[in-house]
Image (cartoon, rainbow, N blue to C red):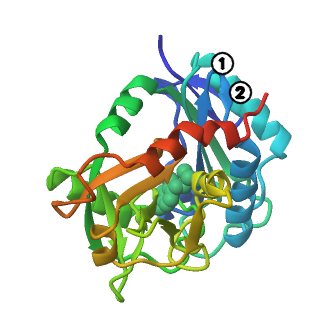
């Protein structure tokens, strides 16, 4: 079955799905995006993703291209046309098409909207979670506004490739103080030897992941201690468990960092339990 993409009001076969050469997303990475999980035919945490998209657009002073309800319709139609039951929806909005010039284009320039959807193999992700993933650390080199989900992802691309080159699955950025910020496309977590669940505060250095927000809700129980604070690479390596969160792989255990085993080198009970319970707490849209 050939895939179909939504591009500025039209549903087109991928082979014909194009944006203009002077689209500012293409020329300046002047745009934002969201990736939303689809599970059993339903969007997961649609409301939060659309709210974060609106925030990213506002921070960059890009006009909202359509209402949240209209975006929802386009996302569902793109899922339907691609017959996605389990998978991902990708949504991108750029500042639109205009003659190349760094300053903003004339008022009234329409933002460009692209939506794609693809199926993923849930069993494959679950199998990966059974073994856990390896992570390498790389020096943080991104701009300070990583709270905006911008399509300018070159440092993330290079970090991920470095991870792959070193035989790992993900790279975690480490700031000048030796503290982990986040992964190339995931938020980083540890469980300390005394049982505290730790993830960096969303005040600085990270994208406030939707999966992170939901996972924090899942951890809410009197028996659990949760700390939103930065942790060092040494603390992560000495931790009982490590894991990361993202819409693409939800809660994914991390069993090795820079070649050093975390705990006994196998996914830990906290990460496993959070992964198992994640979708009970996530909002499943109709
Ligand atoms: N941090 C970065 C840099 C990301 O790119 C992503 C997801 O793509 C995340 C964190 C996780 O965010 P979410 O849980 O909303 O997918």
- Which residue matches tag 2? 76
Name which residue lies at 35% across and 79% down: 232
Alpha carbon separation for disc pair 2 and 1: 6 Å
Q: Position of residue 266 (x, y in %)?
A: 28, 46
Name which residue lies at 18% across and 62% down: 260
Towards the viewer: 119 or 3: 119
Relative to 94, residue 4 above or below = above
| Numbered circle sitting on residue 71 | none
Answer few, some or many: residues within 10 Å of disc 1's Cα (few below 14, many 20 plus, some between 14 and 19). some
Element carrying mark 1: helix
Q: Position of residue 109 (x, y in %)?
A: 73, 58
Discs 2, 1 touching: Cβ within 8 Å: yes
Element carrying mark 2: helix
Name which residue lies at 53% across and 65% down: 100
Q: Position of residue 114 (x, y in %)?
A: 61, 40
Instruction: Note whether residue 231 is visible.
Output: yes
Name which residue lies at 26% across and 59% down: 262
- Which residue matches tag 1? 80
- Rendered image quadrant of residue 283: top right
């Amino acid at each position: 079955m050939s895939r179909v993409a939504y591009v500025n009001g039209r549903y087109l076969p991928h082979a014909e799905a194009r944006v203009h050469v002077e689209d500012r997303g293409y020329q300046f990475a002047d745009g934002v995006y969201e990736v939303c999980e689809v599970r059993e035919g339903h969007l997961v945490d649609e409301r939060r993703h659309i709210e974060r998209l609106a925030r990213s657009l506002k921070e960059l002073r890009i006009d909202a291209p359509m209402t949240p309800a209209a975006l929802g319709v386009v996302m569902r139609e793109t899922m339907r046309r691609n017959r996605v039951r389990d998978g991902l929806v990708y949504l991108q909005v750029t500042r639109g098409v205009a003659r190349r010039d760094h300053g903003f284009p004339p008022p009234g320039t329409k933002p460009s909207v692209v939506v794609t959807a693809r199926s993923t193999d849930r069993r494959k992700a679950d199998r990966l979670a059974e073994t856990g993933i390896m992570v390498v650390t790389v020096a943080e080199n991104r701009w300070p506004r990583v709270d905006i989900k911008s399509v300018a992802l070159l440092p993330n691309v290079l970090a991920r490739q470095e991870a792959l080159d070193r035989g790992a699955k993900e790279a975690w950025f480490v700031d000048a103080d030796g503290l982990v910020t986040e992964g190339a496309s995931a938020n980083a977590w540890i469980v300390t030897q005394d049982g505290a669940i730790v993830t960096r505060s969303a005040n600085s250095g990270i994208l406030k992941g939707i999966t992170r927000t939901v996972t924090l809700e899942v951890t809410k129980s009197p028996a659990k201690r949760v700390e939103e604070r930065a942790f060092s690479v040494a603390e992560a390596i000495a931790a009982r468990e490590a894991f990361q969160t993202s819409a693409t792989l939800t809660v994914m255990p991390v069993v090795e960092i820079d070649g050093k085993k975390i705990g006994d080198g196998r996914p830990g009970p906290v990460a496993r339990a959070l992964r198992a319970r994640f979708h009970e707490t996530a909002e499943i849209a109709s």
